[in-house]
Image: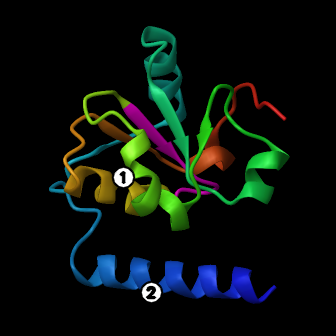
């Protein structure tokens, strides 16, 4: 319980800082896509990385098929596992964490980063459990 509380507090601080610095503007360096666009991207590119930044328990409840779990709190330490030239679709639960992770990836030199608008809650397609 205490760990979850710390994660929530950290996310709120990060989101507040990003709001104050103008995150979400057109200058983010990543593209926000809706579920239909994301589905088309996945069908067109079998090598796209679907990066799910939710927590383990959320991922276990359901996920986009072939997605890779990298909880928000581990993105900085796990980023070396990702290819900077590969397309990456970042996904979270409702669309609040994924833009933060997408912006971080862009700041680290990733060039093909997409954020799923509305997160998994806006995904009308197949969910894997």
Sequence-earlier tag: 2 or 1? 2
Q: Please name whichever residue, 81 or 85, is drawn nearer the observer in this view of the structure.
A: 81
Q: Residues within 10 Å of mark 2 (few under 14, many from 20)?
A: few
Q: Is residue 76 above or below residue 38?
A: below
Q: Quadrant of residue 103?
A: bottom left
Which residue in the protein does label 1 denote? 102
Relative side of 115 to 65, left or right: left
The location of residue 3, given as percent across then percent down, is 71, 83
- Colour approach in the figure: rainbow
- Quarter of the image with the C terminus is top right
Q: Which residues are magenta?
A: 88-95
Badge 2 marks a residue whose secondary structure is helix
Q: Nearer the viewer, residue 104 or 75?
A: 75
Q: Quadrant of the N terminus?
A: bottom right
Rendered position, 116 above or below 41: below
> Quick check: 14 above or below 111?
below
Q: Is residue 1 magenta?
A: no
Q: Is residue 9 visible?
A: yes
Q: Is residue 1 above or below residue 58?
A: below
The Cα–Cα distance between marks 2 and 1, rounded to whole angstroms, is 17 Å
Residue 12 in the image: state x and y as whole percent.
Answer: 50, 83
Residue 77 lies, in percent from the top left, at 44, 60
Q: Is residue 96 visible?
A: no
Give how far across and how far down residue 127 sits, in percent.
76, 31
Q: Name the residue carrying label 2.
A: 13
In-image side of 84 versus 66 (left or right): left
Is 94 colored magenta in this rendering? Answer: yes
């Amino acid at each position: 319980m205490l760990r979850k509380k710390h994660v929530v507090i950290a996310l709120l601080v990060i989101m507040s800082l990003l709001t104050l610095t103008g995150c979400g503007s057109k200058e983010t360096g990543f593209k926000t896509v809706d579920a239909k666009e994301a589905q088309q991207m996945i069908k067109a590119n079998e090598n796209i990385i679907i990066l799910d930044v939710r927590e383990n328990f959320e991922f276990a409840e359901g996920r986009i098929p072939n997605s890779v779990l990298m909880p928000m709190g581990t993105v900085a330490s796990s980023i070396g596992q990702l290819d900077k030239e590969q397309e990456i679709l970042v996904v979270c639960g409702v669309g609040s964490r994924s833009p933060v992770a997408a912006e971080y990836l862009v700041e680290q030199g990733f060039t093909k980063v997409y954020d799923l608008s509305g997160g998994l809650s806006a995904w009308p397609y197949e969910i894997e459990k």
